[in-house]
Amino acid sequence: RVHLYRALLAVLALATLAIIYVATPLHTSAQQPQIDAAHTERPATAQAERPASTTSKQPAAVPWLRVVIPSVGRNPETDYLLRTLDTLCTTAPSSMGHPIRSGLEIVAVNNHDPPAAHAVFAQARIIFAQLVTFIDTVVPPGGCAQNARLKRVTPKVQKQTCGLVSAIQAVLALSTASEHVLMMEDDWLLCPNGLFALSYFIDKATRYDPRWIALRVSYGFNGIVLRWADMRSLQTHLA
């Protein structure tokens, strides 16, 4: 697709005119995690007791939005992933009859090597079993690290890029497609009403051009909204 990324830049410029940051980081390199007290004081047992009937991980036949969260373990272990998933689940409308809730699917991807060493991911799998789809994947597509472009960046960036490629590959292997995909890092919290803001921006972009490529609603590759039809092209470009 010759004009794929030229069009991407154009859409990003358009989105910037009315950008809203729908996700905030749990931490920066200069400070410790700072989140709402409701999250810091809520123990894991309380999360596990949330009634499964209020929300369910069963989305519509074709999800409107699939939120993909690649995750790796930290040393020492932190509960970033638990708080990120909790915010997503509690921010979504409680009624399954709501179009945003019924069309939402949350997918957490374990990119840790080895997967079993990601203790927080294992804990999240238990707590959010009725709300989130969990995938284990650690092997990027063959040749990812051999990409000539990746050789020009630091090993850390190479690893992050190959991890993203691996997560995209795992999501593409799901039996059901979705209309849109939101790539979200595991140490960011969705802002209040973030899902409603996303619905607005996706609808606005589609009215401008149904073939839009991506929407940037946060920093870096956190908060990038893509159409499902473009996921494989992005994976190929990165790999």
Image (cartoon, rainbow, N blue to C red):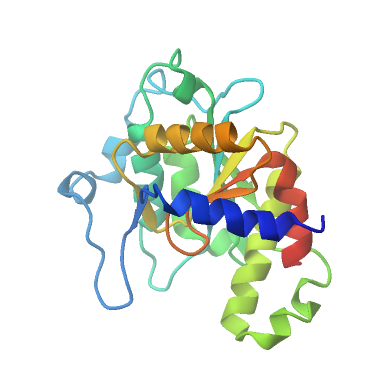
Q: Which image quadrant is residue 93 in? A: top left
Q: Relative to 46, say whether 236 is above or below.
A: below
Q: Is residue 132 visible?
A: no
Residue 207: % across, % down: 56, 31
Q: How many marks?
A: 0
Q: Which image quadrant is residue 29 in? A: bottom left
Residue 121: % across, % down: 49, 53
- In this view, the residue in front, 126 or 11, is 11
Q: Which residue is pictured at 54% across the width and 25% down the height?
A: 103
- In this view, the residue in front, 139 or 94, is 94
Q: Relative to 217, say whether 194 is above or below.
A: above
In the shown orientation, is residue 186 left or right of residue 116?
A: left
Quadrant for the N terminus in the image? bottom right
Q: Is residue 54 visible?
A: yes
Q: Which residue is pictured at 44% across the width and 48% down the height?
A: 123
Q: Relative to 34, say whether 151 is above or below.
A: below
Of all residues shown, which one is farthest toward the top? 97
- In this view, the residue in front, 5 or 170, is 5
Residue 150: % across, % down: 70, 79
Residue 163: % across, % down: 64, 65
In the shown orientation, is residue 156 left or right of residue 30?
A: right
In the shown orientation, is residue 182 left or right of residue 147?
A: left
Q: Relative to 123, say whether 138 is above or below.
A: below
Q: Which residue is pictured at 22% across the width and 61% down the height?
A: 34
Quadrant for the C terminus in the image? bottom right
